[in-house]
């Protein structure tokens, strides 16, 4: 490997390491605050103590409320006093992919199970579970007091099944006036992760202040641990949103405590590593959205969000606002099918390497899906994908090896120039360029092919950790290709390395060192940087890749093995060094025409040489 080839690969490695650090820094952000936004959390959490107290009093009195308790309810809940107490009753709507349990307490989803997925411990994957999760509309107890519908008891209708197997259930929140009520209607289609959610308000305009032209939808979510590595989950726990002008943006929960989005939004999504919950405005857009986030000090909670969404309200007597709720996986094809840009929540390329998402979208994902259509083992799919990519970049690889061979042929002459000019680097550079020109050799021939492979390397770095298809898929000793393949848990943490040993990462590092050792004779051994850097880079990457997805480290290991075999075959059996030497000698005999730029460059170099000689 010639000097310029080494420089090319070193630049590639430096850029890759820089991208990894940049990406992690961008996602991780500032340190988490342990006790932030306490007042907001207090405002959003369930406010049930009074209702529970009254319910217990009613139960002790045989279900009847005395006048004192009734007056207390009337004062606290106003026109919704009748809905302040009740018994919790659950109703289930499900299809073959999702099971949603609704509660009459708040008329909201109490739990959501994704039936085709399991949590990291093998239990059911509950995307929504627990009282923290709320889907609530602020309702007026009086002109001066607001309540959360999540704290009130709705009247549940009977589940209905309509045409096409669509299942529907309605929850109605009654007021003291029979002509006024709030209704939530949910519909679930067969085989769909989408839930139609309609907010239906009748006669509420008479209870709201005369200048209020919106309803406040409070949406609280808690992201529980679903994967083996909770720290990696937190790096991928984000809030994404799509603006009216189709501009997509996001922020990470452990980086931002508060985000006020004052523009109209098409959708808002709380994304986990492999799953998301998204509210989608079907007709009119969401107005202002205020999002507060928190990362509790807990081994089982990834993050929490408190969101207040303003829904445009035209104060019609019969008002409806349709919303779709997506409870499901971050599967690229599924999200793209909605045609609202929701697939952009999947990180296929970010930061300075955002352009590699097009490599993933137009090359990697189609090939991966094609292979998945007839191969069930994802380890075999990765092998086939690796071979395809190596064939794709084969022309660049071959040109790189040809350039190395040419530089190897010229190495004796370059060594003679070094001995002749010694420390006079300026003179050596001029003569070296003349040699390259006379031999018809491009000094960047080994560098450019390596740099052209960079988009593929970074695309793989983005694709494998984001691919839900690899989740909980095993291969060889790796139990889950979407996380690291630990063969030994150390029980303690080694700085810059971790608390476990990933075998694929070890193999990737070893093969990288073998590749560097194999090429040692083609590098400038007198230059310490050129001599040792090919060995330093793999060791530096060892600590970074130790916590990354096994699919990614397996791909890099396999790619290294193929590189070693290709280099051996091409150098020994394909490239004819004698023929290349003869061609170079023939090139030297041909007359060379100089461009004006070359003439000026040589003139400048000549003047610099003369100035150095005068100084001596």
Image (tube, grey):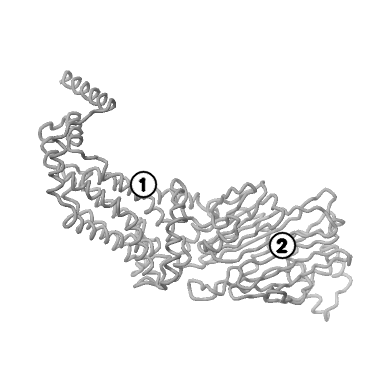
Task: Identify the mark nearer the N-term, 1 or 2.
Answer: 1
Q: Residue 46 at x, y = what percent?
A: 70, 64
Q: Which mark is residue 136?
A: 2
Judge whether 168 appears above or below 399 on screen.
Answer: below
Query: Is 551 located above or below residue 291 in the figure?
Result: below
Q: Nearer the viewer, residue 543 or 108?
A: 108
Secondary structure of residue under mark 2:
strand
Along the line of sight, the residue nearer the viewer: 387 or 302: 387
Badge 1 local density, few (<14 within 10 Å), some, or many (20+)?
A: some
Crowding at dot 2, Cα within 10 Å, few <14 / some 14-19 / many 20+, comes out as: many
Question: How far across and down, in percent of the image, does residue 493 sit?
Answer: 37, 61
Q: Quadrant of residue 612?
A: top left
Number of residue marks: 2
x, y percent for residue 587: 16, 38
User: Which residue corresponds to the image point at 46% horizontal and 52% vertical from the top-left?
Assistant: 358
Q: Residue at x 28, y 52 (%)?
A: 397
Q: What residue is disc 1 on? A: 15
The quadrant the C terminus occupies is: top left
Q: Secondary structure at mark 1?
A: helix
Instruction: Indicate left or right for 583 with 124 as reference.
Output: left
**For this rendering, which residue is in front, 528 or 315?**
315
Q: Which image quadrant for residue 84?
A: bottom right
Q: Is residue 257 left or right of residue 22?
A: right
Instruction: Quote the CA–CA distance across marks 1 and 2.
Output: 47 Å
Tag nearer the camera, 1 or 2:
1
Q: Position of residue 96 (x, y in %)?
A: 59, 76
Is 601 placed left or right of 460 in the picture? left
* Badge number at residue 242: none
Q: Which image quadrant for residue 78?
A: bottom right
């Amino acid at each position: 490997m010639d000097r310029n080839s080494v420089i090319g690969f070193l630049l590639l490695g430096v850029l890759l390491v820089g991208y990894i650090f940049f990406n992690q820094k961008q996602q991780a952000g500032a340190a988490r605050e342990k006790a932030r936004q306490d007042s907001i959390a207090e405002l959003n959490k369930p406010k049930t103590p009074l209702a529970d107290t009254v319910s217990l009093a009613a139960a002790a009195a045989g279900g009847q409320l005395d006048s004192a308790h009734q007056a207390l309810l009337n004062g606290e809940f106003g026109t919704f006093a009748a809905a302040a107490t009740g018994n919790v009753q659950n109703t289930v709507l499900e299809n073959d992919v999702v099971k949603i349990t609704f509660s009459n307490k708040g008329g909201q989803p109490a739990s959501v199970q994704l039936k085709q997925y399991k949590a990291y411990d093998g239990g059911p994957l509950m995307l929504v579970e627990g009282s923290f999760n709320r889907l609530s509309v602020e309702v007026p107890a009086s002109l001066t007091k607001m309540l959360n519908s999540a704290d009130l008891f709705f009247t549940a209708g009977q589940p209905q099944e309509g045409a096409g197997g669509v299942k529907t259930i309605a929850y109605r929140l009654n007021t003291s006036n029979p002509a006024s009520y709030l209704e939530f209607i949910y519909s679930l289609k067969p085989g769909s992760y989408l839930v139609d959610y309609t907010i239906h308000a009748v006669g509420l305009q008479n209870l709201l202040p005369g200048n209020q032209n919106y309803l406040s939808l409070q949406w609280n979510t808690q992201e529980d641990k679903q994967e083996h590595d909770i720290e990696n989950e937190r790096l991928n726990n984000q809030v994404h949103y799509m603006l009216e002008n189709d501009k997509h943006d996001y922020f990470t929960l452990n980086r931002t405590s508060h985000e006020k989005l004052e523009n109209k939004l098409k959708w808002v999504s709380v994304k986990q590593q492999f799953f998301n919950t998204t509210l989608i405005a079907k007709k009119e857009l969401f107005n202002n959205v205020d999002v507060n986030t928190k990362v509790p000090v807990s081994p089982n909670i990834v993050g929490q969000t408190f969101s207040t969404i303003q829904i445009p309200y035209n104060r019609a007597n019969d008002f409806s606002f349709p919303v779709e709720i997506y409870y499901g996986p971050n599967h690229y094809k599924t999200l793209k099918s909605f045609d609202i840009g929701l697939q952009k929540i999947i990180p296929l390329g970010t930061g300075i390497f955002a352009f590699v998402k097009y490599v993933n979208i137009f090359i990697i994902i189609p090939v991966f899906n094609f292979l998945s259509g007839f191969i069930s083992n994802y380890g075999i799919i990765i092998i086939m994908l690796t071979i395809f990519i190596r064939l794709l970049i084969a022309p660049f690889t071959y040109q790189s090896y040809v350039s190395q061979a040419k530089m190897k042929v010229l190495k004796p002459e370059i060594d003679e120039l070094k001995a002749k000019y010694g420390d006079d680097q300026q003179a050596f550079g001029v003569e070296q360029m003349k040699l390259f020109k006379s031999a018809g050799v491009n000094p960047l021939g080994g560098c450019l092919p390596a740099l052209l492979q960079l988009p593929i390397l970074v695309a793989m770095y983005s694709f494998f950790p984001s691919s839900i298809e690899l989740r909980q898929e095993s291969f060889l000793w790796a139990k889950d290709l979407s996380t690291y393949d630990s063969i030994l848990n150390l029980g303690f943490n080694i700085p810059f390395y971790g608390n476990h040993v990933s075998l694929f990462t070890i193999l990737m590092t070893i093969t990288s060192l073998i590749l560097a050792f194999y090429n040692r004779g083609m590098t400038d051994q007198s230059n310490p940087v050129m001599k040792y850097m090919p060995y330093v880079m793999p060791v530096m990457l060892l600590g970074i890749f130790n916590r990354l997805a096994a699919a990614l480290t397996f791909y890099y290991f396999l790619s290294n093995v193929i590189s070693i075999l290709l280099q051996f075959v091409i150098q020994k059996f394909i490239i004819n060094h004698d023929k290349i030497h003869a061609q170079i000698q023939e090139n030297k005999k041909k007359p060379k025409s100089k461009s004006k730029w070359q003439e000026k460059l040589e003139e400048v170099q000549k003047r610099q040489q003369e100035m150095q000689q005068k100084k001596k």
